Image (cartoon, rainbow, N blue to C red):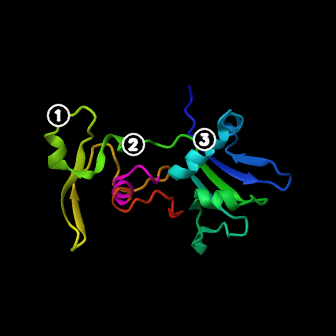
Amino acid sequence: TSVVEAVAHCLREKSNEVKLLPSELAGEFMEFVFAPNAQQAARDLIRIGAIWFLPASASRDPSHGIKPRRLSIEQADMMVLEPHDYLRIHFHPRRFPVHDFDWNATYSESRGSSSENSKPGVIVAENASKGWIVINKPSGVPVHMTVDNARENVQACIYHARCGSSTNDGDG
């Protein structure tokens, strides 16, 4: 069995067809589009940061410094794809066990807890006035965002726990 990377590079042609590059992914893309929950699946991919966008009007020459940006839910809700717009879709983004931890609890508190429902904390020490925090980084969770997942990482989880924000800012 051959392994096909689950990333599609899409261009919308003038004929309103979506052209996939490479063509080997056409079957997977069509399965995704025609799935009963395709709209929710697309929103989930956007929310996690697995879809990138570059408008047709942007230069395709990387020396000009214009690169695709992560597509946010807010951007996707307001946009209409134009011919030759570029989408990079990571259909199967890597997932990380961020929901197994309490990102706002201290590490020492959670280690002694006997409750089956409590999640282990990660905060070892902090000084809010000086602006630093020390955590016990969970194994298997990246420190920063990856190309296919901007949400499940230490930086995003600590920010969300402390600031309450869960929006995808579109940066990549």
Q: Earlier in the sequence, mark 1 or mark 3?
A: 3
Over which residues does the magenta segment extend? 150-159
Under mark 2, the amino acid is Phe
**Is label 3 in contact with label 2 (beta carbons under 8 Å)?**
no
Q: Which residue is mark 2?
A: 96
Q: Nearer the viewer, residue 97 or 62?
A: 97
Q: Earlier in the sequence, mark 3 or mark 2?
A: 3
Q: Relative to 71, is 58 on the left or the right?
A: right
- Rendering coords of residue 48 (x, y %): 51, 50
- Rendering coords of residue 154 (x, y %): 34, 54
Magenta stretch contains residue 156: yes
Q: Earlier in the sequence, mark 2 or mark 1?
A: 2
Q: Which mark is residue 41?
A: 3
Label 1 – label 3 distance at C-alpha: 37 Å
Q: Quadrant of the N terminus?
A: top right
Q: Residues within 10 Å of mark 2 (few under 14, many from 20)?
A: some
Q: Nearer the viewer, residue 24 or 148?
A: 148
Residue at 36% across, 60% down = 159
User: Helix or strand or loop: what does disc 1 sit on?
Assistant: loop
Under mark 1, the amino acid is Ser
Residue at 67% across, 44% down = 22
Q: Which residue is mark 1?
A: 114
Label 3 – label 2 distance at C-alpha: 18 Å
Residue at 35% across, 50% down = 142
Considering only vertical position in the picture, is 70 above or below 40?
Answer: below
Q: Which mark is residue 20?
A: none
Q: Nearer the viewer, residue 129 or 93?
A: 129
User: Helix or strand or loop: what does disc 2 sit on?
Assistant: loop
Quarter occupied by residue 5: top right
Under mark 3, the amino acid is Ala
